[in-house]
């Protein structure tokens, strides 16, 4: 039987999936759905670079190195840590709950806070970037506030946990959620195709925050909203140039987390083309928001 090519944007919930190499739209080689639990055997093809991407039981694999038999992309320690079985398993079983000691108000309260910023784009699609085990992806899907949710992470084990949590929930709206493995610095979406991007407790783990936020800016539609929570670093590191450079150098060499100050976060969003920066702080916790100019 001849394969049927269907453009992803027309039949996959409007989430604008694209090749992470050339950013051209992906077409589907078969007509099976791509929501959670139905991605096994799914094939997506880029008609520009002719690369094919595959889905397995839990997720679509849309990293640039997908399908390589000789090369497995490795990341700094702060990223690789979350690819392990142990950390992925523990993330919602005590790890994330411990953030309350740093001032994080807890997932439900953080979700309510995020909704206030996301209000202008409700009804659109949202990417939960660096979603981990899908704590917020599930909340977004069950809220009914968005037409489509993409739970995106680089860690295969985190996506496995996300899949298992969803499978255990009764009456979960699976048709609203797609699990995608992708690199935050090479997002597999067409430019200006996403209404909102959320990143919960993730920005400090990104190898290059500027590259990641630039990618987020690229994929957001005009008027699209970026909301993120992270741990903040103030004190002398935020104001003394020598100390700030020293801190950035050490974290770069060690491959550890990158904790930015409020001023740095605002500057990061501005230099990546986002406007209207706001933030809410509580000790080490900060929630920031910016939007793509209309």
Image (cartoon, helix red, strand yellow):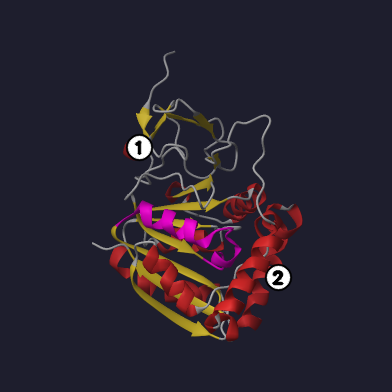
* Nearest to the observer: residue 240 or residue 292: 240
**In the picture shown, does residue 121 fall above or below 28?**
below
Numbered tag placed on residue 11 in the rendering? 1
Residue at 43% in and 53% down? 215
- First in sequence: mark 1 or mark 2? 1
Label 1: which secondary element: helix
As rendered, which of 135 and 44 lies closer to the eye?
Answer: 44
Per the rendering, the mark at residue 94 is 2
Q: Which of 240 and 157 is in front in this view?
A: 240
Q: How many labels does the image show?
A: 2
Give x and y (percent) for residue 277.
36, 74
Q: In which quarter of the image is residue 13?
A: top left
In the image, what residue occupies the spot 53% across and 66% down? 200
Is 88 displayed left or right of 182 in the figure? right
Q: Residues within 10 Å of mark 1 (few under 14, many from 20)?
A: some
- Does residue 80 appear in the picture of this structure? yes
Residue 22 forms part of the magenta stretch: no
Q: Position of residue 219 (x, y in %)?
A: 37, 52
- Image quarter of residue 59: top right
């Amino acid at each position: 039987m001849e394969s049927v090519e269907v453009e992803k944007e027309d039949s996959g919930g409007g989430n604008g999936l694209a090749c992470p190499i050339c950013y051209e739209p992906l077409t589907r080689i078969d007509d099976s759905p791509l929501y959670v639990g139905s991605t096994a055997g799914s094939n997506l093809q880029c008609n520009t670079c002719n690369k094919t991407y595959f889905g397995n039981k839990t997720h679509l694999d849309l990293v640039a190195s997908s399908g390589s038999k000789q090369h497995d992309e490795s990341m700094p320690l702060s990223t690789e840590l979350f690819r392990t079985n142990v950390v992925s398993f523990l993330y919602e079983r005590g790890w994330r709950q411990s953030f309350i000691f740093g001032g994080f108000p807890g997932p439900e309260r953080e979700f309510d806070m995020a909704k206030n910023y996301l209000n202008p784009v409700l009804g659109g699609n949202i990417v939960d970037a660096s979603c981990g085990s899908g704590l917020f992806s599930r909340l977004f899907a069950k809220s009914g506030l968005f037409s489509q949710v993409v739970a995106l992470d680089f860690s295969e084990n985190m996506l496995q946990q996300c899949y298992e949590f969803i499978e255990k929930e009764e009456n979960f709206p699976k048709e609203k959620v797609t699990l995608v493995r992708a690199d935050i610095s090479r997002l597999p979406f067409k430019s200006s195709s996403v209404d909102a991007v959320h990143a919960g407790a993730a920005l400090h783990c990104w190898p290059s925050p500027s590259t990641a936020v630039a990618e987020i800016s690229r994929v957001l539609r005009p008027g699209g909203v970026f909301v993120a929570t992270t741990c903040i670093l103030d004190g002398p590191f935020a104001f003394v140039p020598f100390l700030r450079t020293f801190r950035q150098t050490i974290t770069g060499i060690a491959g550890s987390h990158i904790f930015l100050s409020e001023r740095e976060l605002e500057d990061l969003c501005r230099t990546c083309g986002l406007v209207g920066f706001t933030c809410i702080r509580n000790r080490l916790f900060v929630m920031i928001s910016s939007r793509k100019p209309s």
